[in-house]
Image (cartoon, rainbow, N blue to C red):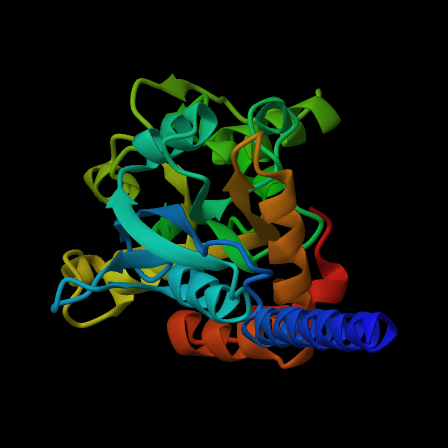
Amino acid sequence: MVHNKKIVSVLILSLVFILVLSGCGSSATTAAVDGSGGGKVRTIKVAYDQASKPISWLDDQGNPTGYDVELMKAVDELLPDYKFEFIGTTSDDLLLGVEQGKYQVGVKNAFWTQERTKKFIFPKEFLGLSSAGLVLKKKNEQVKTLADFATAGLTLAPIAANNAQYTIIDEYNQANPNNKIKLKAGDTFGVDVVQWVNEGRVDGGVMIEGPFQKQVIAEDGPYHKFANDVVYNEFAVIKTWPLFNKKEQAFADAYDQAIKKLKEAKKPNELSKQFYGRDLFEVLDTVKR
């Protein structure tokens, strides 16, 4: 009898052990499917410049949109361990907020600079491409490049030193010491380039094509009345990046995996045509920066 009782006890313990393992296996399978890994979904604060149409802005319904925002929304869909909360702000607050950890990541059509690598994590995969150009009076439309601008001795609108556009011009000057552009640092992140050029306060200014199209070319643009008076001449197409807080390497790595899949699916190409009116990725092979 004692022997039989021992056998029954062993069988019961074995059954319990099997049931426990089955329960664990079920949980593991569920975690693998929903991507949670058994942990809590983490909310990520994504800062964006809310006054940079068509790159990022608030639409008429008060919803964040634009190339940078919509592509980050697509990234969010591929990362079940994260939930993105989009927070509209200014360019200056975005830079400071991401650096201090108020936001985990920020998007603002940001260019890479050596100085910024000291404050932010740049992921391996860039977010998009941006056309940078010179805004000029119609009489100066023959000025096509930075070298042309410098040779003509034209004056440039001030650019804030923490604006990557300042770095672009500074890099040109360092590479061309005998044909420099007169570069002046502004007190704010950016001046109203179109207005300054139209008023004749300066001969030209650096601007991104998207905002120029929305401000000047679009019929409802605030400066559409100057459409026949000023021109935009592209001098470079430049990669743009999301800026991650220095403590967010794991999150930046997750972003890299997601954006790779989106690029394979041509999502950035689609959004570039939607928001910029052209597929900037068609000239990716010629992009130097």
Q: Quadrant of residue 254?
A: bottom right
Q: Nearer the viewer, residue 227 or 260?
A: 260
Residue drawn 45% across and 39% down? Answer: 104
| Percent position of residue 237, x then y | 60, 55
The quarter of the rendered structure image containing the N terminus is: bottom right
Q: How many marks do you count on the picture?
A: 0
Q: Quadrant of residue 216?
A: bottom left
* Whether residue 41 is situated above or below residue 206 in the rendered picture: below
Work out which residue is located at the far right of the displayed protein and give it: 3
| Percent position of residue 30, x then y | 57, 75
Q: Nearer the viewer, residue 26 or 212?
A: 26
Q: Is residue 156 visible?
A: no
| Percent position of residue 14, x then y | 77, 73
Work out which residue is located at the far front of the displayed protein and give it: 1
* Whether residue 202 is situated above or below residue 277 in the rendered picture: above
Residue drawn 68% across and 67% down? Answer: 260
* Whether residue 131 is situated above or below residue 48 in the rendered picture: below
Question: Residue 69 vs residue 112: left or right?
Answer: left
Q: Is residue 230 visible?
A: yes
